[in-house]
Image (spheres, grey):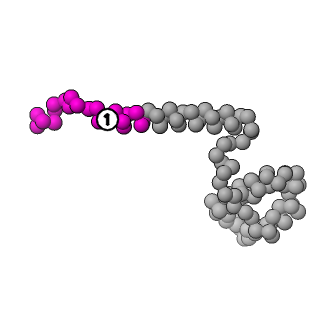
Amino acid sequence: MMLFLQPDENVTWLAPYAYTIVLLGFGFALFRIFENWYAARYDRPFYRHYFVFRKLPKEQVSLLEKELDFYNLLNRREKRQFQHRIVTFVSEKKFVGREGLVVTDR
């Protein structure tokens, strides 16, 4: 039992681990500062735009173009982002019709 209670005098092996933890924390803090600066400067997040965008089927894109005036005002990049957000939203939510209402794309 006394073996576990004695302090270890030779703890130099911990130094590389401690340095690594400190450097990772410092790097993370710098990344967060850079990310906030980038978002403020370019009005968009730094990393979110590097994901692969999911696309809507052509029938649903034509429905957006016919039914939403807002969609037609967007530029090409914003349309891709909007479509990706719609696909993500629809895949995460479950739509249930009530009182005989049938849920369709319209």
- Asked whether residue 52 appears in the rendered view, the answer is yes
State the residue in front, 82 or 19: 19
Residue farthest toward the left in the current orientation of the protein: 2
Residue wearing tag 1? 14
Residue drawn at 50 percent across, 32 percent down: 26
Residue drawn where x is 66% and y is 51% of the image: 50
27 inside magenta stretch: no
Is residue 101 visible in the rendered image? The answer is no
Classified by dominant secondary structure, the portion drawn in magenta counts as: helix
In the displayed structure, 87 sits above or below 23; it is below
Which quadrant of the view contains residue 90? Answer: bottom right
Q: Is residue 64 left or right of residue 1?
A: right
45 horizontally vs 27: left or right: right
Q: Position of residue 53 (x, y in %)?
A: 69, 58
Which residue is located at x 73 percent, y 68 percent? 103
Q: How many marks?
A: 1
- The one of 29 and 61 positioned closer to us in this rendering: 29
Label 1 crowding class (10 Å Cα cut-off): few <14, some 14-19, many 20+? few
Q: Position of residue 36 (x, y in %)?
A: 65, 35
- Magenta stretch contains residue 5: yes
Quarter of the image where the C terminus is located:
bottom right
In the rendered image, which quarter is residue 84 located in? bottom right
Question: Tag 1, which secondary structure?
Answer: helix
Q: Left or right: where does residue 27 sit relative to residue 76?
A: left
Q: Quadrant of the N terminus?
A: top left
User: Where is residue 57 drawn, in percent x and y?
Assistant: 76, 68
Q: What's the amino acid at mark 1?
A: Leu
- Residue shown at 16%/31% (left/top)? 6
Q: Give the residues in magenta.
A: 1-21
Which of these two is toward me, 47 or 78?
47
Name above or below for residue 22 compared with residue 47. above
Which is more toward the observer, 30 or 68? 30
